[in-house]
Image: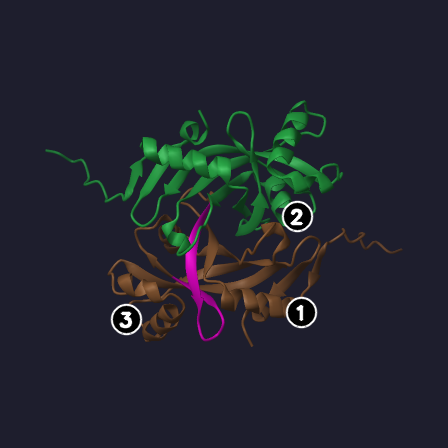
Chain colours: A brown, B green
Amino acid sequence: MNTTPAKPFDPVRDANEKALRTAHHLLKDTRFASLATLDAEGHPFASLVSFALDRAGAPFLFVSRLSAHTQHLLANPRAALLVGEPGKGDPLAHARMTVQCLAEPIAKDSDDVILLKTLYLARHPKAQLYADFPDFIYIRLKPLGASLNGGFGKAFRLTADEVRLK
Amino acid sequence: MNTTPAKPFDPVRDANEKALRTAHHLLKDTRFASLATLDAEGHPFASLVSFALDRAGAPFLFVSRLSAHTQHLLANPRAALLVGEPGKGDPLAHARMTVQCLAEPIAKDSDDVILLKTLYLARHPKAQLYADFPDFIYIRLKPLGASLNGGFGKAFRLTADEVRLK
């Protein structure tokens, strides 16, 4: 007797090559994103952030310790980054991707900081204005996986490895 | 002896009249937002949604039960909605607001549905295409409070009552 339960309908497919290209385009060519964090009570919070990519293709932030989202990430690393570049017309028709991730604050005296600063300023030249403010820190968002929405009915899941650029 | 601990520096102020005007403008004149939810493991998730306002000034969604965010909200009502209308230039220089909220799914046979449908279609006429799809439901997002960011260094908190339109 086959006791395997019927698999529930899952509208989300594993990412194909075209989906991965779209995903990497979004990460490489988007400068701003929405960040979901957890506040001190474990309630979701959402904020606008700028981000860049490290050499391994993981997103990272450059944020003030005074910001709510930074305080959230330092207390609880669980987060998600929604990247997308809305064009003309209905934003829901444009591709966007949710990367679920874990925040890893980078120590000020880490060797990583010089490279992250270079990469961040290349993408956000105006951040030069606050690049040396003492309350700002780099936080890497280590991808756990992602959901790509390529428009109505086109949903794909990506593994942590697939999120990173080749 | 005064044992009151020194109050930590709080860069967030209570909302003044101008901040409330900005907040209500964002809620009234923005059609899309980022929604933060919690997945089955309690990890934050972020997605793009369209929204409208009910008669009491609370945001509500019209979403498919097949969507990840809908499944999250039905299992755990804790959510946040990030509203903002990025204009030209640096999005971080434009006003945006995070409304922390609790999701309240509206029963299909509720009297509310007719009014919510009218309000939703007035703001999103193209939703007529899927207005009667059986998997779509209305979900009210009952505000708990909000954080308004009016650009660098201009942060305000709003109470649940202040989030609602007068």
- Chain containing mark 2: B
Q: Which SS class for mark 1? A: helix
Q: Are marks 3 and 1 on the same chain?
A: yes
The residue located at (29%, 38%) in the rendering is B13
In the picture, measured across the screen, residue A155 lies left or right of residue A6, that is: left
Are discs 1 and 2 located on one and the same chain? no
Query: In the rendering, at what x and y percent does residue A64 appear?
Result: 31, 56
User: Which secondary structure, mark 2?
Assistant: loop
Q: Which residue is mark 3?
A: A109
Q: For this rendering, which residue is in front, A51 or A41?
A: A51
Q: Of helix, strand and loop, which mostly describes the magenta segment?
A: strand
| Whether residue B25 is situated above or below residue A76 in the rendered picture | above
Q: Position of residue A86 (x, y in %)?
A: 55, 55
Write down the chain letter for disc 3: A
Q: Residues within 10 Å of mark 2 (few under 14, many from 20)?
A: some
Residue B57, position as x, y percentages in the image: 50, 29
> Which chain is indicated by disc 1?
A
Residue on which disc 2 sits:
B67
Amino acid type assigned to the residue bearing label 1 in the image: Lys
Q: Residue at x 66, y 61 (%)?
A: A156
Can you give x and y, in whole percent of width and height, for residue B109 in the image? 72, 26
Residue to which mark 1 is pinned: A18
Position above or below: B113 against A149: above
